[in-house]
Every structure is written in structure tokens, then in C-alpha cells.
Image (cartoon, rainbow, N blue to C red):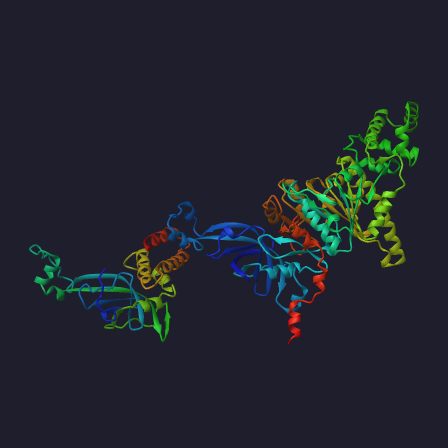
Amino acid sequence: MRFINNRTDKIAEVIEASTAQFTAQCYELYGLPPLGSLVKTGDIYGIVCHAETAGIEPGRKPIARGKDEASEEGVYQSSPQLAKLLRSQFTAVVVGYKDGDRIYQHLPPQPARIHGFAYLCQPDEVKEFSESFGFLNILNNAALPVSTEELVSAALRQMSLAHEDSRAFLVAGGKEIANLLSSDFIRLKNILGRLK
Amino acid sequence: MTERLGIVTNASLEKGADVRLDSPVSVEDMVVGRYVTIEGQKRRFFGMITDVRLGVTDERLSVSPPDIDDPFIKDVLTGTSTFGQIHVTPMLTIGGDADSMLEGPQPVKTIPTHFSAVNLASEADIERVFGKEDKERFFVGNPLDMETRLCLNLEEFVKRSNGIFGKSGTGKTFLTRILLIGMLQKSQAVNLIFDMHNEYGWQGTSEGGPPVKGLKQLFADSVAVFTLDEESSRRRKVSTDFVVKIGLNEITPEDIAILRSTLNLTDLAVEAAYELRKRLGRDWLNKTLAMDEEEIREIIKGATIHESSFQSLKRGLGTIGRLGFVMPETKDEAVSNILDFLQQGRNVVLEFGRYQEISAYLLVANLLSRRIYSRYQQRMEEAIAADNEAMKPRPLVITIEEAHKFLNPEVADKTIFGTIAREMRKYNVSLLVIDQRPSGISEEVMSQMGTKITCLLDNERDIDSVLAGVSGKNELKSVLSRLAPKQQALIFGHAVPMPVSFQPREYGSAQSYKDFLPSDKTATKPPAEDIEKLWE
């Protein structure tokens, strides 16, 4: 897992936004927030549901360059242009917004703004946000590029890191999912299996 | 202190309410028979847990169970996908407004709304329903798993005939002793106890323990011990007040009719007894036993009695004549003595000593009761005619054991006990019936019993007959059949607002005897708070 050096810094900029999700391009190559982490742009909160690193031009594919290099880092050192030709971007599913002091865990009235800065939420904010589990329902029903089970469990795992008693948090979250998936035990089992 | 258990998810007046338990509440802490309150929107309901179940939201969960070794999965699923459920039978309700508060608990006629909160009943709730110990209410025990004192209104209790049932060894005798003490202290009624096994009067036995004190040891002033067997009483060092003798001249054909099956008599032999009485008059029994061959032939001829019937009868009468307490002639002293004691407000325990065979018990209990009852009837009618309340005799409770022998469908019509049970309080006499085979008692008599207290019963027919006609019978059945084999009982009927299973109070230790004795001295002392107030 990569860590961003200064967590209060902006990490990306929104390049595509809709009511249900937004995509942001990272300022640093590979400066991606972890899957399932809570990010925000403006007053809108999102959970990272997908990330990719690819060439900036859709037609030009990267080619293998490391045959004569001793390490992977060496590839980037000997071809410094790579950092400019490649880009990392992530997509976050919108799970809520802040209005004044209150956090609402439902879709915001307006989508995020293009070129809005995206930040990785700090533990305090994550804790505040995860006091309620309304976002789980949004994740559960969203059309996602990864499986719901994966994302829901990743999100809870990420959030649990912000809580002192992460097990208690996971149990509480698990119970919420158990209620949401009361009629689908197999999915529930898959998620719970990924929470440990 | 209330403890929330869960919420009502489903209910019907007929079938009761389903309650889904909150996740921290373990089903294993829920026991059948416990009291809960349901906080409806407009009223509170009191009910009893009558079933405990496990539920799952998805059937697949029971088909392919999760990894139960993983505590995390278990924690998550408990109370969500898998949950506990209890079934509550609401029994009483108290409305929220002031009027209904004053009115007190009423029988249930409706059900709580969806998702009403369900709590364990607190001590105050129980007290509100059953009342506090006072001059009419007597502390009989504690509701199961609770510290609260369960109080029984004995003034109400003695207004009907009552029954105590339970398999042998479940604590019927202890329970009866407690109730007798209660009646002695809290009600106007006096007791006449036909004590077959010498358990109540002076001292009784306790399984695997030292002997326990009987009524007279505790309340010498208000209890008299009569005996049929002076010798046995003396051996047991019982101070008796009177030795009862039964005269053959007092025995009527009706008494013989009840003994038909115990004496192994034919129907015709019983008929012969009536015939002989008609011909020979009041002293028919003595005369019959004294007859020689010649006289017998003569009477058989004249009275159309078959010889074998006569011989069968004579054999039976011989058995009675050989009982040690039977005299050829007595002057009805036993009955008038018993009545005198009862009228003075003293309770009478009649010990049977060594005469523990059922025929002796049936004969004596029926014979004495019939006479006492007829005197009561006479006095009561005189009092009614004179319209004088003071002339009415004291309410009398007759305690009989092995009641199914007196009250089985075959003889219930013939014995005095059948009459008492049916006619209830008309003549101020009621019954306290102790029995281990309630199914043997006539249905009609069972249906007239006011309050029934039952210890564990495990025969299906016995359970059915005890619970016949009670609302929520099936639910109570599951409570009843799960009582502990000792010292637990279920009480329901006239004297209690709703059924309750309870553990009878302690009887047998020095402290328990002390607790039974009236605490007059402490009652007159003003409570500590009042003294505090004087200083203000």
C-alpha cells in the first residue's frame, strides 16, 4: 500500500463528474488513494471504487523498457519522460456530502466540479463520516466497476483503521450489512469473509 | 430497573405476540414462564414468555451454516441474520390514563402495536399486578428467577374450592403447609384438614432432611390436633386435643357406596346396604354384623337380596368393623367437638395415625364432612332466614388428600365433596383438594375449582385436566411441563390476576418459621422515615 507523504495535501483533480461518481487524475504518478478509502472534493464525499494507471494518449500503449535495467526503479530513472506520459486516475462513487456541519449520506444535489481538488480524508473525518452506515446502502446498490462485495469490504477495512477499536467497528458495520443483505446470505458471507 | 429484550414483530390476540430479541440479549437467558411487559402506544401489557425460538433471515443460512469458529462472523450474525425470538402470551393490560391506572390490571382484550418495546418485568411491575403483602395478601413464594415477593390474596382464595396438584415428591405437601399457614393468618376461614400421612399437625417429614414443624408447633393457639390413632400420636409425641372414634351406628349406606371399589363390593351389594338400612333402621350396620345364619336367611328372603351380594356386603362391613377407631356406638361427639373448635376459630388437623389405608380415609373424611356440612347448611339457612350476618358460621375450608378417590366421576355425585365442590360457597364451606392424579377427578368438579396450583405433572391427561378451560392453555402447558421436579409451581385461576410460575417460599429452616410468625411488634413501630420527618 502506498502512502501519500502529506495527507492534508490535495492528491488529485476531478476530470470527470456525474451525480453518482467522479473521476480524478492524480498529481503524482501512482499517487493513488487505496481502494475503498474515503476521498472528498468540495463538499462531496466519495469512496474509491476503481483506479488505473495508463498512457495519456489512448492510442499509444506503453512498451517494455527494462530489459537492461537492474531494477524497476531504474526504468523510470533512465526514461524520465515516463512520469509525464503516464497518468494515474481513480474513480470514486459518491456516498454523501457535507452541508454546514452536517454530513448526509445520500447523493448530493449537484455533482462535483471539474478541476475540483480531491483530498484523501483524514482519520478524524473518516471517523465522523463513519458514525453512520448509510453509505453501505449506496455502495450496495451502485453500478460499480468492481464487485460490490469487494468494495464494501474494502471500504469498511479502510474506515476501521481510523477507529481505535477497529474490530468493534467492523462488527457494527458487518451487522449493518447483514441487515441489508438479510435475504442473501451468500453475498453476506463473501463480504464478511473479506472483513477479517 | 427494566431490561429491554426486544420488539414485537407479530401478534394476535389468540396466539400471542412474537418478539424479536435485540442482539445483546441471549436466547439462553430467556426462560419459559418469566414475566415481561410490553409498552404499547396507549397501554402496557403484562405477559408471560411461553416459547423461545431461533430465527434466521435467510433459509440458506441453516442449509450452509457459516464458519462458527470465527468469533467475528458469529458476532456479526448474532442478532442480525440469526436472532432469538420469544413468544409472549399477553395476559393483563393497564391503560395509560388516570382512570385505568386506578382500575388496575384488566384482562387482555387487544394486542400491542408493531415494534412495541418488550422489557423484563420489574419488581414494581409484579407488585402492581399481584399486590404487596398486607392483611389479606400472603407471601407464598417468588416468581421464577425473580426476587419479588409473590403475594396471594387469601381472602379471595378461600371464596372458592381450590386444588393443589403435582406428581408425588414435587412439593405439594410443603406448598399446602404454606397455604394453610397463610389462611390461618390472613383469612377469616378455618381449616379442617384430613391428614392422611400425619404431615400437617405436629411435624412432617422432608425428603432427605430433618423433620419439619407442623402447624401446631408453630401456632399452638389456633391449631388443634385430633387423632384417630391415639397410640401412634403418643408414640410420635404429639399433643392431641381429641381422639376421634367412629360409631358403626353413624355409618350410612352412602358411605358404603363410596367405598364400593376400595372394599371390592358389587353394585348389588351396595344396593343391599340401602335395603338393609330401610329394613333395620339407623343401627343397621351393627345389626347386620351381629346376625346369625337364621336371621340372615330370613332377611334375604324378605328383602329380595341375593345371598352372594349379602355376603359380599357383610365381608366389606367386616373390614370396616375391624378398623381400630370404629366403635359399635358413639354419640356424635367427634363432629360436635370439631365444630366447637372450628367455631372458636381453631383449625383442626385430623391425624390418621397408622390407619393410612384409603378405605379408612374415605370413610372418615366423607362421614365427618357430611355431618359438618349439614350443620353448616343448617346454620347458614338460619342466618339467612334471620337476616343476621353475625349468625353465619365461619367460612370453612376442608383439606383432603388423594382427592381423586372422592371426586372421580363415579362417586363425585355421591360424596359430600362433590356437593361442596359444586355448590361452592353457598354454605360457607369450600375444599382444598390435594391430588397427584387430577385426571381422575370429575370434569365437573375440576371446572368449579377457583384457583389451581400445580407442581410438575408429566402425564398428558393430568396436564390436560388441570388446564382445561384456561385461556392460553397450550402456552401454559409448555410452562407447566417444564417446571423443575421440585419446589416450583404454577398458579392460576380466581385468586391471581394472571398465571404465574413461582418458587414456594422456604419452609423448614429456623428463619423460615420465624418469618411465618406474625410480626405484630414491628408492625406497630412507625417506619424509620416517619421518625426522620419529626425532626424536620
Q: Is residue B79 left or right of residue B435?
A: left
- Residue at the location (84% across, 27% down)? B309
Residue B369, image x and y in percent?
81, 44
Q: Quadrant of the N terminus of chain B?
A: bottom right
- Residue at the location (75% across, 35% down)? B357
Q: Is residue B290 left or right of residue A40?
A: right
Say whether residue A139 is visible: yes
Q: Is B469 or B31 nearer to us in this picture?
A: B31
Q: Is residue B350 above or below residue B11?
A: above
Q: Is residue B430 above or below residue A152?
A: above
Q: Is B531 or A133 nearer to us in this picture?
A: B531
Q: Is B325 or A193 nearer to us in this picture?
A: B325
Residue B345, image x and y in percent?
81, 53
Quadrant assignment, res A171: bottom left
Residue B469, image x and y in percent?
68, 48
Residue A61, image x and y in percent?
13, 59
Q: Quadrant of the C terminus of chain B?
A: bottom right
